[in-house]
């Protein structure tokens, strides 16, 4: 059996929020499951590059691309997906584990403008 045929996840993975926590763990899981390519995105470029480098050290034949994204900025998100698609030709698996923080008030006390940030 070829290496490609033995892959659990033979496609291209995109992980947003990959610099730390669950996003970082999923990035490693995708890599170890045999994705053909991995596009990692986060706002924290230092930690993002570290994650990418660690994956590359463990799996040197895997193509890993890192990209800074600000999920609070629509244009940044669009650019992220376009760049991933251009780098690999397609995207098969996506995990978005990044978000923007809001105030910590109960929902009934939120101002409409605050809530609209999360609905667009």
Image (cartoon, rainbow, N blue to C red):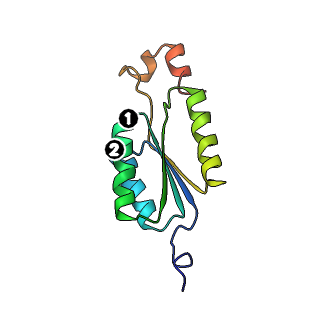
Image quadrant assignment for residue 4: bottom right
Q: Nearer the viewer, mark 2 or mark 1?
A: 1
- Report the side of 36 relative to 30 (left or right): right
Label 1 sits on a secondary structure element that is: loop
Residue at 45% of width from left, 60% of height from top? Answer: 30
- Say the numbered circle drawn on residue 85: none
Q: Residue at x 54, y 82 (%)?
A: 2
> Dot 2 lies on which element?
loop
- Quadrant (top left/top right/bottom left/bottom right) for the C terminus: top right
Work out whether residue 62 or residue 11 is closer to the camera in this orientation and state it: 62
Residues 88 and 100: in front is 88
Question: Where in the figure is residue 79, as x and y percent of width and height?
Answer: 60, 35
x, y (%) of residue 90?
A: 65, 54
For the image, the number of numbered tags is: 2
Report whether 116 appears left or right of 60: right
- Which residue lies under the disc numbered 1? 44
Label 2: which residue?
A: 20
Q: Label 2 vs label 1: CA separation? A: 9 Å
Query: In the rendered image of this protein, does residue 11 appear above or below residue 102?
Result: below
Q: Along the polypeptide, which appears first: circle 2 or circle 1?
A: 2
**Marks 2,1: beta carbons within 8 A:** yes
Q: Position of residue 6 (x, y in %)?
A: 51, 78
| Image quadrant in which the N terminus is located | bottom right
- Tell me if residue 15 comes above or below residue 61 in the rendering: above
Number of other residues with Cα within 10 Å of mark 1, as a class: few under 14, some 14 to 19, many 20 or more:
some
């Amino acid at each position: 059996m070829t290496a490609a045929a033995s892959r659990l996840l033979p496609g291209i993975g995109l992980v947003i929020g990959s610099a730390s926590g669950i996003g970082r763990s999923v990035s490693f899981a995708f890599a170890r499951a045999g994705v053909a390519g991995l596009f990692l995105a986060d706002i924290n470029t230092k930690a993002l590059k570290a994650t990418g480098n660690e994956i590359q050290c463990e799996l040197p034949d895997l193509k890993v691309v890192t990209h800074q994204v600000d999920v609070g900025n629509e244009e940044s998100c669009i650019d992220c997906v376009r760049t991933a698609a251009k780098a690999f030709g397609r995207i098969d698996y996506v995990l978005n584990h990044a978000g923007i923080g809001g105030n910590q008030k109960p929902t009934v006390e939120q101002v409409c403008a605050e809530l609209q940030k999360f609905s667009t």
